Amino acid sequence: MQRSTSDSKHGTDVKLIYAGGTFGSYGQPLAPLDVDVFLPVLQSFLTDELPYFSWLENSLIKDSSQLHACDFMHFYTLILKAYEQGQRQFVLITGTDTLSYLGAFLAEAFAGSDICIVLTGSMRPLLDSNIVSHYQRDTDSDAWDNFSAALRLAAYGNSGVQICFGGESWPAQTVQKIHSHDLMAFTGHGRAAYPASSYAKDLPVARRQHWLDDRTAALNATQARAEKAVVHALYCLPNDADVLCQQLNALSKKAPCGIILLGFGAGNLPHSQALADALDQAYAQGHMVVCASQCAFGGVSASYAAGSWQYEHHVIAGERLTISAIYARLLWLLLHYDTPTRRRQRWSYTISQNTSTRH
């Protein structure tokens, strides 16, 4: 299905991807409408005031709480192939549960390119489920405003991956959901380093082709790793250190994976020699363990002895990265690089560029 309105600011075609979520949900209980049903309805609401765009066919329509690594790879592959064919500007409509995770993942995956991707969704469905005789826009919903703003932002064409929500937009890897049902459900910030700093405003043809060749050559291996790639989170509670040690030892027996330690405050953890040994063992077996803070803002630091001890046992400091961004970076490293050594080297390179990131 194709639909066009007046040209965008740069006269380019924005590709719209509908992936389900609250935005396109309808009925009691709410569930995403099939694409063949929803897109014609959305099309009927459009006006000539919006930029030119067309649909990019997508077979994966599901609630975002059900998304996993293979689904993230689906969207990466879908957009990558369109980018290879010359498309550069995209809007992705998805659910809010994992919107920040998917956005941060795409930011990592497309780093080094000049692509423009804007993700959005809504806290209330576009359609009024109280009206059953026909589909009608819910005038109290945030869906239409979010969609319109995202489309205009994508038409402007700034390189990078952004999330547009509630009248604001931010680099995707800085965004986190802070409210479970309020319309102003997300926040982020503009002072982002890598991967936002790696996007080129105007990528020379040769460099663009080199980037594409590299990603295309690695695609099959990356897709295969997604079948087994897992990122775990261990949430620290006021328990004895042995509890965390037991959880870590259980994960260490599995194939190399990503592990996020959600510490107290600035990344503080309960200490024991057994837990220190478990961290050393996890490293020896190829796992990447990253410390994050349970706090919404501020990140971690090594200024407290209660937290600094872990970094002597191969734990990686998550710095000021959000939990979503840490998950996304770990997942991309697991998918794109074939050895624990290369993954850690790449993390060290990218994390050093985030020292200026602030919440």
Image (cartoon, rainbow, N blue to C red):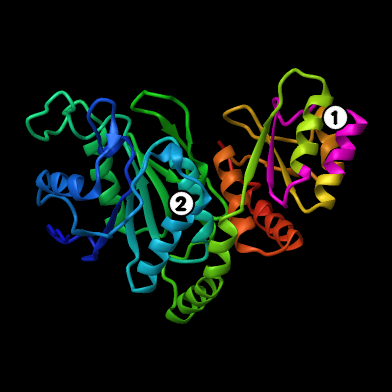
Q: Quadrant of residue 296?
A: top right
Type of the residue with mark 1: Ala
Per the rendered image, the range of residues in magenta is 252-280
Q: Is residue 40 above or below residue 22?
A: below
Q: Horizontal and vertical percent for residue 222?
A: 56, 64
Q: Is residue 274 magenta?
A: yes
Identify residue type, mark 2: Asp
**Side of 81 where 350 appears, left or right:** right
Q: Residue at x 8, y 34 (%)?
A: 134
Q: Position of residue 272 (x, y in %)?
A: 89, 28
Is 282 displayed left or right of 13 in the figure?
right
Dot 2 alpha-carbon crowd within 10 angstroms: few under 14, some 14 to 19, many 20 or more: some
**Which residue is the extreme one toward the bottom?**
206
Looking at the image, is mark 2 or mark 1 earlier in the sequence? 2
- Residue 269 is left or right of residue 224, and the answer is right
Q: Is label 2 in a helix, a strand or a loop? A: helix
The correct choice, above or below, for 57 with respect to 242 in the image is: below
Residue 84: within the magenta? no
Q: CA distance from mark 2 to mark 1?
A: 40 Å
Looking at the rendered structure, the number of numbered marks drawn on it comes to: 2
Residue that label 1 marks: 305
The quadrant of the image that shows the N terminus is bottom left
* Circles 2 and 1 in contact, beta carbons < 8 Å: no
Which residue sits furthest left? Answer: 133
Residue identifier under label 2: 71
